[in-house]
Image (cartoon, rainbow, N blue to C red):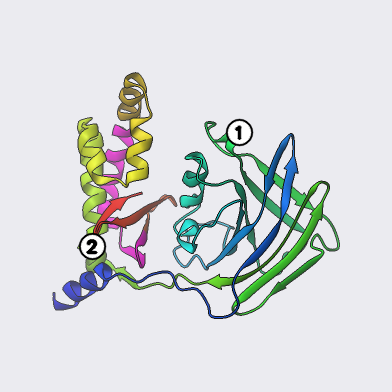
Amino acid sequence: MRTVILACLLALGPAPLMAQSGAGATASGTYSEDGVTIPLSHGVALRKDDSEGILFDEAGIWVLLSDTEAGPSALAGGLFPPAYDMAKQGKLQGVLFVVKPGNRTDLSVSVLATRDRNQGSFRTLSLSKTPELWDKLVVGPTRISGTLFSGETHFSFDLPIAENPITADLHGAAAQASPQLAVLTANAHAWIAGDLAAVKATVTHRKQAEIDGYSAAERAQLAAQAGPDMKALLAAMPKLDRVVVRGDTASIRTPDGSAYDFTREDGVWKVD
């Protein structure tokens, strides 16, 4: 029991994203496709190793080039980090891509454009060229730099690679006793009850805003659709035996291969 308590205490301790030492970040260029033009003047990079197994084939160094400054936390979390919501809120425009080890011929670029922020998803630009797509790409232990020209789109960057190390890896009884599993359980019960006020109490601010953006009819439909899934989740709860914490973010992978993300806001863990 003492081991379980200690592990849970470790999960509560904050640990910020850490940027590597060295010269500052530089980025320049322009995204220009399909009538959308975005000046790229800022950049940030974060290594995501995917020990959790939640990124599918998107493990690597995530790079965000944008028209305004963003920190490494904009890239933290799972497949859809806060950068997407920042773009939907009009806080930035830019391009987001993953540099994968050994792959220099293909690149999938998410275009975070203001024009598309009210759509269900942002457009993706797929680039491919052999034997080498990049005009320059240097990946070191602590920095990444690159230059790419593709039609009217071109950009260069030289960035320190931020790290987001695992701060707690909870298994078995420790995972079952974690605050992340507790809030996920409360979230599931709230959805089953159709109590959206209770649901909002268990989710992050950005998820609360998302719920508030739905019409009354859409909220009712959402609650009805969520009920069966949440009942299945509760039935699977005893099998959720691993919680991975990285500072103020965490994740739980379910037996069916899906995952739940969590963020600590004001000292309290919430479903994200």
Left or right position of 114 against 147? left
Q: Residue at x 45, y 60 (%)?
A: 73
Nearer to me, 42 or 74: 42
Residue 76 vertical placement versus 113 (above, below): below
Tell whether position 186 is magenta. Answer: no
Label 1 secondary element: helix
In the visual, does 216 lie left or right of 132?
left
Find numbered disc 2 in the image and state the secondary structure of the residue it sits on: loop
- Total marks placed: 2
Taking the spot 26% from the left edge, 49% from the top edge, the residue there is: 184
Q: Quadrant of residue 133?
A: bottom right
Residue 78 location, x and y as percent?
A: 46, 55
Q: Which mark is residue 115?
A: 1
Q: Point out residue 153 in the picture as x, y percentages from the top left corner.
A: 77, 49
Question: Label 1 amino acid?
Answer: Arg
Report which quarter residue 222 is drawn in.
top left
The N terminus lies in quadrant: bottom left
* Gap in angstroms between the C-alphas marked 1 and 2: 41 Å
Neighbor class of circle 1 (other Cα within 10 Å; few <14, some 14-19, many 20+) is some
Q: Which residue in the structure is indicated by mark 2?
A: 178
Pick whichever, 60 or 57, lies toward us: 60
Residue at 58% over, 80% down: 22
